[in-house]
């Protein structure tokens, strides 16, 4: 047995032997397969990257068939149960869990960067009162690069480290400011005596208290949700930061592209859509009717399905446990009954079973966020805060990978063959025909 793939090109009768490494052939090895010297060479066609690895990575491992997710080798359940989000951030960025001293130094480093330049408040003020907070955050992160022009020097490890620290530290502040702007409340400055999640709750919800004390159960629940969302290998937004970052733009600009990708309803915007869907269904009794619509292709069951998981998303399972703890503090979200009924019926229906559609991370997270007092528009923002760590770990890995170059896919051109330009005076009749 050899680790190679033998290909016979039936157009020419020639045979090629391609090496297989880590379960993959190199797409560039296909280029040698040509019909003649004029031929560009064989390419692989893979719209939406259904079966194409764009990088090697040592950060996150997913086995979608078995519902497995590891951060740097550690199962997500163990990490979420025992760690804090900043500890996970250290792990994802550096590859190893921190010692006690390393963790203390890291938490301190993040904490001292939580404040934002006062001018940031001015341009957040400029957004319309009903601007979506995710739009505010994505624009503001892009604008942050104007405050830190040195960030362009991505060849310098100390400079890039500083940008990573800034982004992790300031994302909760920007997110909270975006929220306070949307509800017309004054911004609350960071309280650096609180934890990462506790301080975020302070900046969101403090009103006139001298010192805001977050509920410890909600603080821990939010931190665990942050851990579950920290990284998920080559998802749409991670692919975005890698692709945009491959042009060697500064990480703040690259991260605004990732936030834009996460904003979409098929990605991080899905938890917002789940809540709208549950509210639209209205009552548990209406669930069978809604499922019928989904099966008829008239609606999508938001929060179900995943490109990679073809079994239960391990994060969704963990989130169900967090929901129980949160609802003990906040009271049960009445939409939970509709969600549970949707899951119960969907998991029995052939439509969902045959397509391997299971609840994903977004199916239950929105219910928790709503019970904690977050408006729906904040849900994608709550995803972007912890995913910052994943994006930046992946960006750092990409920048340091000697195999990576500017990301530039090929295309299969199916358009018109070469033809001569038609002067406008000679196009009139054809145009009229086209418009009729
Ligand atoms: N409801 C109903 N049918 C679905 C759903 C759904 N949520 N998801 C997939 N399907 C169906 C598709 O219609 C398709 O059916 P077909 O084979 O008859 O055409 C089949 O299942 C396969 O689905 P695809 O769309 O080809 O799968 P893909 O991997 O491209 O999409 C995605 C994955 C985008 C997540 C999809 O399942 C979806 O739209 N889900 C709802 C949105 C959502 O919850 N997104 C969050 C994902 S998790 C995250 O980003 C954090």
Image (cartoon, rainbow, N blue to C red):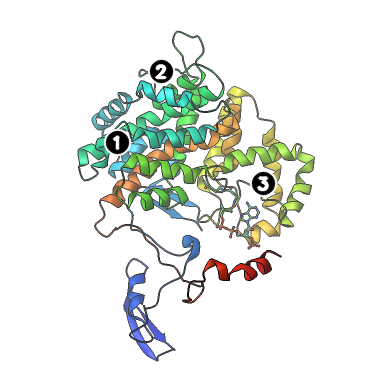
Q: Nearer the viewer, mark 2 or mark 3?
A: 2
* Residue named by callout 1: 163
Q: Position of residue 83 (x, y in %)?
A: 39, 34
Q: Position of residue 155 (x, y in %)?
A: 21, 46
Q: Nearer the viewer, residue 216 or 194?
A: 194
State the separation of the CA atoms marked 1 and 3.
Answer: 41 Å
Q: Looking at the image, in which quadrant does ligand 1 appear?
A: bottom right
Q: Nearer the viewer, residue 269 or 212?
A: 269
Query: Mark 2 and 3 residues: CB-CB less than 8 Å, in contact?
Result: no
Q: Earlier in the sequence, mark 1 or mark 3?
A: 1
Q: Residues within 10 Å of mark 2 (few under 14, many from 20)?
A: some
Q: Residues within 10 Å of mark 1 (few under 14, many from 20)?
A: many
Residue 104, image quadrant: top left
Q: Quadrant of the image for the N terminus?
A: bottom left
Whether the residue carrying mark 3 lies under 8 Å from ligand 1 is answered with: no
Q: Nearer the viewer, mark 1 or mark 3?
A: 1
Q: State the residue lying farthest toward the front.
A: 425
Mark 1 residue element: helix
Q: Is residue 34 left or right of residue 419?
A: left
Q: Position of residue 126 (x, y in %)?
A: 48, 26
* Residue named by callout 3: 343
Q: Earlier in the sequence, mark 2 or mark 3?
A: 2
Would residue 303 be visible to someone looking at this image? Answer: yes
Point 51% across, 35% down: residue: 134
Q: Earlier in the sequence, mark 1 or mark 2?
A: 1
Q: Nearer the viewer, residue 176 or 387?
A: 176
Would residue 96 be visible to someone looking at this image? Answer: no
Q: Nearer the viewer, residue 11 or 284?
A: 11
State the separation of the CA atoms marked 1 and 2.
Answer: 20 Å
Q: Which mark is residue 189?
A: 2
172 above or below 427?
above
Q: How many marks?
A: 3
């Amino acid at each position: 047995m050899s680790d190679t793939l033998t290909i016979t090109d039936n157009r020419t009768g020639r045979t090629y032997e391609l090496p297989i490494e880590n379960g993959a052939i190199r797409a560039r090895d296909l280029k040698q397969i040509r019909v003649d010297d004029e031929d560009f060479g064989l390419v692989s066609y893979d719209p939406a990257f259904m079966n194409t690895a764009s990088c090697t990575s040592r950060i996150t491992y997913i086995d979608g068939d078995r519902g497995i997710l590891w951060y740097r080798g550690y199962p997500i359940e163990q990490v979420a149960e025992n760690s804090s989000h900043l500890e996970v951030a250290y792990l994802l960025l550096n590859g190893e869990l921190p010692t006690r001293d390393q963790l203390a130094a890291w938490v301190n480093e993040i904490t001292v960067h939580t404040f934002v330049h006062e001018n940031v408040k001015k341009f957040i003020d400029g957004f319309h009162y009903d601007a979506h907070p995710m739009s505010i955050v994505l624009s503001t992160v892009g604008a942050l690069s104007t405050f830190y022009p040195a960030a362009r020097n991505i060849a310098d490890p100390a400079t890039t480290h500083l940008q990573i620290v800034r982004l992790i530290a300031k994302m909760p502040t920007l997110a909270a400011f975006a929220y306070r702007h949307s509800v017309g409340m004054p911004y609350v400055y960071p309280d650096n005596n609180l934890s990462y999640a506790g301080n975020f709750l302070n900046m969101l919800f403090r009103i006139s208290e001298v010192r805001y004390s977050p509920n410890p159960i909600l603080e821990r629940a939010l931190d665990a949700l942050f851990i579950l969302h920290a990284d998920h290998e080559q998802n749409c937004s991670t692919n975005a930061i890698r692709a945009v970052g491959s042009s060697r733009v500064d990480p703040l600009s690259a991260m605004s592209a990732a936030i834009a990708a996460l904003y979409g309803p098929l990605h991080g915007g899905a938890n917002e859509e789940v809540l709208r869907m549950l509210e639209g269904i209205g009552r548990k009794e209406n669930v069978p009717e809604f499922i019928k619509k989904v099966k008829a292709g008239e609606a999508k069951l938001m929060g179900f399905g995943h490109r990679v998981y073809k079994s239960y998303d391990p994060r969704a399972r963990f989130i169900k446990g967090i929901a129980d703890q949160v609802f003990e503090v906040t009271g049960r979200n009445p939409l939970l009954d509709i969600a549970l009924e949707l899951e119960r019926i969907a998991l029995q229906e052939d439509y969902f079973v045959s397509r391997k559609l299971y609840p994903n991370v977004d199916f239950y997270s929105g219910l928790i966020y709503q019970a904690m007092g977050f408006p729906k528009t904040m849900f994608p923002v709550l995803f972007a805060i912890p995913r910052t760590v994943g994006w930046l770990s992946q960006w750092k890995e990409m920048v340091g990978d000697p195999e990576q170059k500017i990301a530039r896919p090929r295309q299969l051109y199916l358009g018109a063959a070469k033809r001569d330009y038609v002067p406008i005076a000679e196009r009139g009749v054809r145009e009229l025909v086209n418009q009729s």
